[in-house]
Image (cartoon, grey):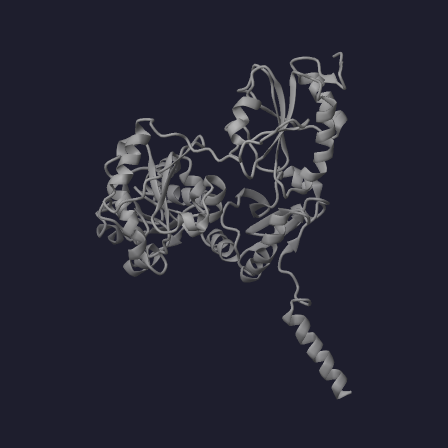
Amino acid sequence: MESLVSRVVLFGVLLGAFGVSGRSEVMELRDSDFDYVSADQETMLVKFYTPWCGHCKKLAPEFEAAAKRLKGIATLAKVDCTSQTEVCGRFGVSGYPTLKIFKNGQEISSYDGPRSADGIVENMKKLAGPDSTPLHTERDLEDFIDHFDASVVGVFESGDSPRLAEFLKGANLMRDGFRFAHSTNLQLGLKYDLDSEGVLLFRPPRLASKFEESVVRHRGAFSVTGLRRFIRDNVFGMCPHMTRENKDQLRKRDLLTAYYELDYLHNPKGSNYWRNRVMKVASQYKEHGLLFSVADRRDFLDELENDYGLGAAEVSGMPFVTVRTRSGHKYTMREEFTRDGKSLERFLEDYSAGRLKRYVRSEPVPASNNGPVKVVVADTFEDIVNDPQKDVLIEFYAPWCGNCKKLEPKYSELAQQLAGDPNIVIAKMDATANDVPQGFDVKGFPTVYFVPAGRKDEPRRYEGAREVKDFISFLKREATNSPVLGGAKEEL
């Protein structure tokens, strides 16, 4: 008996060790219970997923680990969009995984932060705390601003101040992007040249530089809109540290980035070596409309490889410099970054004068392209898709995409039926290996667009069903000329 009990105990220990008996801390929500369950959660992060999605599978253990660490702070939940179609449709889910943040059942924003357990925990903790942290002493203030991120601190005469009320409204609206604190001790502002009510924006201490002030002041009356504008115009400074969390915000402007190996947690001085050289040049180019930034190349290896065709060895050593415009155009500095900054100056002079050739990532042009479905790469997009005489139906796909593989035989059959039509081109492009031109919003696969003859600046996303007969019906309605099927002209 003792031996049997021992075995049962041992088996239970092993099950626990391998996580078999561990209960998931991620809530599973359904169409029938989503609304009333989410309404009971003060702060909740919801993952909309499908079981077949590779990125969803990769996220699952990170999401589970984050849920365990956030227990009692914020709720993590998931919705299977293969079965819970009502909820997924209501929140406009079209790609997987999609993460959204809810407060008391109301969606407040998409989650665009890192998808590691550490990143999820850090971001959700920000949302779960107060909108603005009250500060009472100088030590409170010093502790608050000694942080990896920027800090926004309002200083007011009393708790009844109308400006404090407005500040707290702004903190509530912007808390997912910035850190807020407030104090009714006016003495805290004197050290920073603020002798009345106002707002202090403290840039991260690790980014302190002789080229700009570390503290920016906003005095006098302000509105929520004015507070938002003040933060937006000043929070990043002359040369911010671009991370996976803030890259979308920074890329709303034309952005120059120097990618190199930096580590602000363990080596802030070394990390600022190249940043100081970028800032020296940036201080001379303030009027050129560019925002400057630095980034840890290890955080963006996939992007550097996918967007610029660089391997890990090619982005090691000296900084790799790029300009990415708001419209998505890319330029690269091919000259080595010199320590005196002269190479960067020359690059900026050529960029400002329009002498640089735009970088386009493209697969090699196919040696032959005689199949019914025309293969398009970035270097042939203009000739094939933007041929003014042709209507073009183009599929943007990914080689690993399951739905793309399901579509392939139907798409090929469509192309075969239209092979004799001189006016319609059925085409496809690997969107993971080629730059997708502006005007084509490709966020999931497959994405199909119709590009009509004579109106190449008006591409239209195909939203219909994906059977051959559905594509043909669409082309009968939309094609410039009557489609020719199997060699016979179709009457409209």
Q: Is residue 465 above or below residue 237?
A: above
Q: Quick one: which residue is furthest to the bottom in this view? A: 2
Give the residue displayed 53% in from the left and 43% down from the top: 108
Residue 479 % position (x, y) = 66, 16
- The answer to whether one can see residue 466 in this image is no
Observer-nearest of 450 and 184? 450
Residue 214 % position (x, y) = 27, 48
* Left/right of residue 217 with respect to residue 12 in the rendered view: left
Q: In which quarter of the image is the C terminus?
A: top right
Residue 151 % position (x, y) = 35, 50
Give the residue displayed 30% in from the left and 58% down from the top: 142
Q: How many labels does the image show?
A: 0
- The answer to whether one can see residue 440 in this image is yes
Residue 275 % position (x, y) = 30, 48
Observer-nearest of 154 and 119? 119
Q: In which quarter of the image is the N terminus?
A: bottom right
Observer-nearest of 16 and 177? 16
Q: Is residue 192 above or below residue 66?
A: above
Q: Quick one: which residue is furthest to the front in this view? A: 367
* Left/right of residue 130 with respect to residue 19 in the rendered view: left
Q: In this view, does 108 lie above or below 135?
A: above
